[in-house]
Image: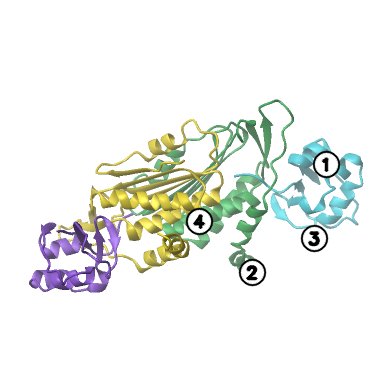
Chain colours: A yellow, B green, C purple, D cyan
Amino acid sequence: MIVPKILLSAEAFDAAREEELLLAGRTDVGALVAFTGLARDEDGALSALELEHYPGMAESELSAIAQEALSRWPLQGLTVIHRFGLVRPGEKIVLVLAAARHRAEAFAAAQFLMDYLKTRAPFWKKERRADGRAGEWVAAKERDEAAAAAWEPRVSRAKSPR
Amino acid sequence: MIVPKILLSAEAFDAAREEELLLAGRTDVGALVAFTGLARDEDGALSALELEHYPGMAESELSAIAQEALSRWPLQGLTVIHRFGLVRPGEKIVLVLAAARHRAEAFAAAQFLMDYLKTRAPFWKKERRADGRAGEWVAAKERDEAAAAAWEPRVSRAKSPR
Amino acid sequence: MKALYFASIRERVGRGEEEIAPPESVSTVAELIAWLAAKDEAYAHAFSNRKTIRAAIDKRHARLDSPISSAREIAFFPPMTGG
Amino acid sequence: MKALYFASIRERVGRGEEEIAPPESVSTVAELIAWLAAKDEAYAHAFSNRKTIRAAIDKRHARLDSPISSAREIAFFPPMTGG
């Protein structure tokens, strides 16, 4: 049974180290997909992003999404790390590692995880502007909702008996 | 204009270093998808994979596939590294890094690149068995052909005027 | 029960959490939102755009028609923007 | 022209490359495969399963009906299995 690694971090994390930990000593993994989400400065307009989160629910929701991914695909390893607090442009906000024997499963799981994370994990980004003016909360995107909804049919079936 | 980095390597490569090189000094990248393909030992049956390639064509074909990816998606960086020669179980065979502002493009480009690489880049794997018996050439998979074909319509249109 | 507010809703309400005691007639998330919005101008502003309000009961996503009777903690927040 | 053989085809032919001089009547990849397969048992074996033979002309993928007249280098190989 695979136990996903879920981590919230107030500090920059070491993605290469996480990949090493996931693959260490293994000779059965054929495909590893790593997704990294990074803070952009929007052509110099932003000095940072403030990431607010709902402690407790953020972890449990990421765990639930990870478990859903494990139930859908035969994964060999799954890591999800998400920053909170102040994140500077160029820094990593989120890391998803999905390991499987074959690439299709690893790609699907990583995409699913990001699509669900974007719309279900309780994090909110506020822009901190480089010019000192008040920053805005980042608006949720229609296309993120659509991407998550595209995975839904299977979930509805899975949920109905509960 | 993005110049993809294409590299064939007879030795193990440093994926973390490649990611650093691709992201160094940048604050405009929002999404990085890294695909790593690794040699499996098939439950201990294999001691290594021998990777034969067609020198010259392997590089040019990888470059052509990378250019096709750049023409399809607004990428900010693209790296493709492929081993040749003897690869031990657990070692990395291939690395694809696709950077973009948003995740959909990075995911699509990395998947496209792997699907095309599998069916178009002139590499062939032969198994080296742990028990010393003669190893077999790895058979091409129907599903790899199908995965590549799924990207085709756009290619046909792109190719016809040439 | 404890009410939690996050992001823009937190800023508009002016606090991150508080104890609330809605009357028994308030039995769903939607009714609780209406009750909160009626408290004062700040709450009215925070809960003005009902379509963009998400809620969680005891740290699990809830719907507008979810019952709140057994809730110890109810959180309100705008659509999520992590990742 | 130069012929190159890779992987299982190389092993069956018994060499990785050679100079070949097909007659002028051999004008396509498919005809060149037939001409090579007729050379001897080893070549016949190497080129026995036509459906799985891939070819490249001057390091670019070619089709069975591709003309070979201007080719300097023609490579034959089974379906690729990299990645």
- The residues tagged by marks 4 and 3 sit, at their Cα atoms, a distance apart of 31 Å
In what element is the residue under mark 4? helix
Tell me which residue sits at (57%, 32%) in the image.
Answer: B89
Residue where numbered disc 2 is placed: B161
Asked if the residue at tag 4 contacts the one at tag 1, i.e. Cβ–Cβ closer than 8 Å, the answer is: no
> Foreground residue, B95 or A161?
A161
- Both labels 1 and 4 in a single chain: no
Q: Residue at x 35, y 49 (%)?
A: A63
How many callouts does the rendering have? 4
Q: Which circle marks residue D19 in the picture? A: 1
Q: CA–CA distance between discs 1 and 4?
A: 40 Å
Respond whether the residues carrying marks 3 and 1 are from the same subunit: yes
Is the Cβ of the residue at disc 3 closer than 8 Å to that at disc 1?
no
CB atoms at circles 4 and 3 under 8 Å apart?
A: no
Q: Which mark is residue B109?
A: 4
Both on one chain, marks 4 and 2? yes
- The subunit carrying tag 1 is D
Mark 4–mark 2 Cα distance, whole angstroms, equals 23 Å
